[in-house]
Amino acid sequence: MSIHLHREMENLNRAALEMCAHVEQNVRDAARAFLGRDWELARKVIDADRHVDRMEMDLAENCLKTLALYQPVASDLRFIFSLSKISGILERIGDLAENLARKGKSLSQLEPVVVPKELTDMADQARAMLKDSIDSFVDRDAIKARDVIKADGAVNAGKRLVRKAGEEAILEKPAFCSQWLIVISASRNVERMADMAANIATEVVYSVEGKMIRHGFDCE
Amino acid sequence: MGGVRIHIAVIAAVVLSGLAAMLPLAWSGAGILSSFYNEMTARELESGARLLALALPAGIDGKTREELGALVRAARAESHARYTLVRKDGIVVADSDEDAERMENHLNRPEIKAALAGETGVGTRLSPTLGADWLYVATKLADGNVIRAASAMEGLNKRLAQWWTKALALVAGSLAILLIMALVASHLISKPIADAAACAERYAGGDFSYRLPATGAAEMRRLAGSLNSMAGELDARFKLVDRQREEMRVVFDNMSEGVLAVDETGRVILVNGAARAILTLPENAYGSPIETLSRNADLLDAIRETASSDRPSEREIRVEHEAAREALVQVHTARIREDGRNAGVLAALRDVSRLRQLEIMRRDFVANVSHELRTPITAIQGSLETILDERPAGAEKIAEFVEMALRNTKRMGAIIDDLLFLAGMESGLGKEAEKVGVSSVLPAVNEAIVLCGEDARSRKNVIEVDCDANLTAVMNPRLVVHALVNLLDNAIKYGPEGGTIAVQVARDGDRVRITVSDQGPGIAPRHQSRVFERFYRMNGAPRVKKGSGLGLAIVKHIAIAQGGDIRLESEIGAGSRFILSLPGGK
């Protein structure tokens, strides 16, 4: 196969990994800023998201260019196609991190409440899922990717727990209503991130095995 | 491997030069032979012709053809020549071998022409009548007619064939001898060269132990000598380079600073053990793009920015190790330049987490000391100012304020005593000034319990002791009592009223472990590593007025001063266990 295509694919892969690094960091910092009431860090995450957006645009364009120039087939085609989709998903995760950071910024301006442990756990789980999905992409490991998809259920359960805790807290102390509304919507944010990580894992399975397992369809 | 082999070159040269010398020799010999033969034959024919001319003193005119025919045939019988008599007008009148009547006019024959002109005519050609090479010699008779003698050249051709056969056989024989000599000579030349080449190939392959034997021609001995000394020198230099490289590698791999270098395409070209540990890189990182190894955005940014800038940069990045642990890493990056072009980026990494932690501890310590000393001073100042400003009536009132001032003075004194004690322990005075030796553990435990007895009784605590009287440890009993008093004091202060405190002393291998367990609220994991810091207070812990905030720090230093250590096992709601471990006696 053409050497140029493979060199181009390696460059795409590296650009995607660099984007992964930034998105992972933004998610980590956003969670830290939200849970630690760190206004400065939240602002940093919001600024950093522009960089991620820029990377996504470059990557998508380079994917298209490669497709048009080299017209790859079989696994090369699947790889580039998945890469282009993953970059889109990563960009959305970056946006969610930015949203979480904005909520953290608002929360840090209000009187502090004790954030439920479930939300901290959710954030950890979502981050682990993101990390594992990217690892599975780096290692082309479909088994790990399937594990990520399975882990999504726990985060969904966490969201329900946070919602319940929030409702109880509001009933108990309506004065802290705005804080708790932010916490509940943050939990939805985190849950969306976990969904996106699972989507990345789905793309990895497709890229490696050539099987579409979206929307609950699985050839297994 | 192009080029002609020495064997072939030498043999070709010898054979060609042999042929070049011998063939012209044979050729010229053949030439001399044939010209000599021709000359001799011509002379013989001429004398034959002249002799026959003597038999015809009056010429041929007037003689019949029959007479003349008989004469030439008689002459033919006496010599090996053919005789022909030709008239002036070219008509043959008699021939010894042929019928003269049938022979054509001979006026055009060169030898006849020459004879008619008065010379002796000689000619060599194919005889049309007899079909062979013939030599003709003609001479003029007295009456102007011509007599011609001729001889076939068969004899010459036969001799020449013999000559060539012999000459070629001789040439072939000497060529064979030359060939053998050429083979020997070329072998003598090419063998040492092939040996030297094989030897040089071994050296090129890194085997410097081989030595070329110095034999054969003087030039070859010299070549062998220089090859051998070159091998020795190369061997020594390679060993030096290897050793230096190995030294560099050991230094590089074991230095505490991490070093990571990538080339201009972002692939790792250099990484040492420290860098691998700091960034949790896999073992075989060489050659992989840095993005596939580390997904630390700050690190990637640092490398990318330095690659396109001339200025070295410095920054601190966070590196996540396991889920919870995070290291603060100082990264210095600089561009690598090679022949004036960009050849990659070099990064030096240093884990500064501990340094930062120590800085925080020192800052906290200063703040805490000031705070701890400020509190009693405020109280003393307040009491004294009250006395001065309000001048309370009655000695009892005054005594109350003075007592408050005194109590706080004592507290300050206690804090300063503890600080001095700690400073002394830290500067090594604790170990130097007081002797450490083998002594029983039980008396020290009992003394500590007696010293804490009053406080324990006031909180209705029971202190249980489990200690073998024969247990000994290498320790300074006074210091151990001090440490135990601090531990018991904490257990009493933080434990529930009426609770049980257990002191258990047991041997653990070559160490003695003194465990003080309480039934207090326990200490959360995140505080556990910090409770031994000076003035460290847990958020939310009941603030006990009494202590100086230095008790556990003192215990830790006492343990270290005697070669022991202190550990904490605790769980929220399940009490705490402080384990003081000391070197056992004998």
Image (cartoon, helix red, strand yellow):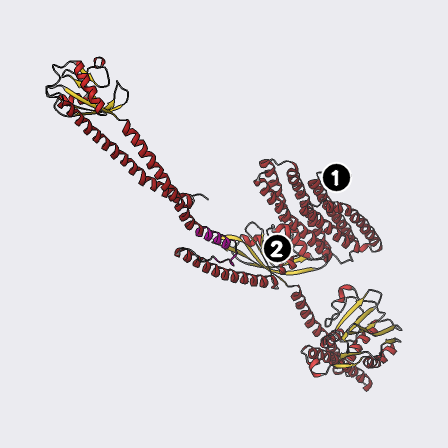
Q: Where does residue B223 sit, x and y in percent of width and height?
A: 42, 56
Pinpoint the chain carrying mark 1: A
Question: Looking at this rendering, what residue extends furthest in the bottom direction?
Answer: B395
User: Does residue B152 lie above or below B189 as drawn?
Assistant: above
Q: Is residue A196 left or right of residue B127?
A: right
Q: Position of residue B306 (x, y in %)?
A: 55, 54
Q: How many marks?
A: 2
Which of the image's four quarters has the C terminus of chain B? bottom right
For image coordinates 29% across by 35% down, the residue present is B27
Q: What range of the chain is rendered magenta?
A: B192-211
Assess whether residue B401 is covered by the magenta stretch: no
Dividing the picture into quadrants, the one containing residue B492 is bottom right
Q: Residues within 10 Å of mark 2 (few under 14, many from 20)?
A: many
Tell me the CA gap for discs 2 and 1.
35 Å
Q: Amino acid at mark 2?
A: Leu
Horizontally, residue A161 falls left or right of residue B239, namely right
Q: Is residue A109 visible?
A: no
Left or right: B330, with A142 as reference point: left
Q: Which element is circle 2 on?
A: helix
Q: Amino acid at mark 1?
A: Arg
Find disc 1 in the rendering and name its residue: A214
- The majority secondary structure of the magenta stretch comes to helix
Q: Nearer the viewer, residue B224 or B479?
A: B224
What residue did someone put label 2 on?
Answer: B299
Which picture quadrant has residue B430? bottom right
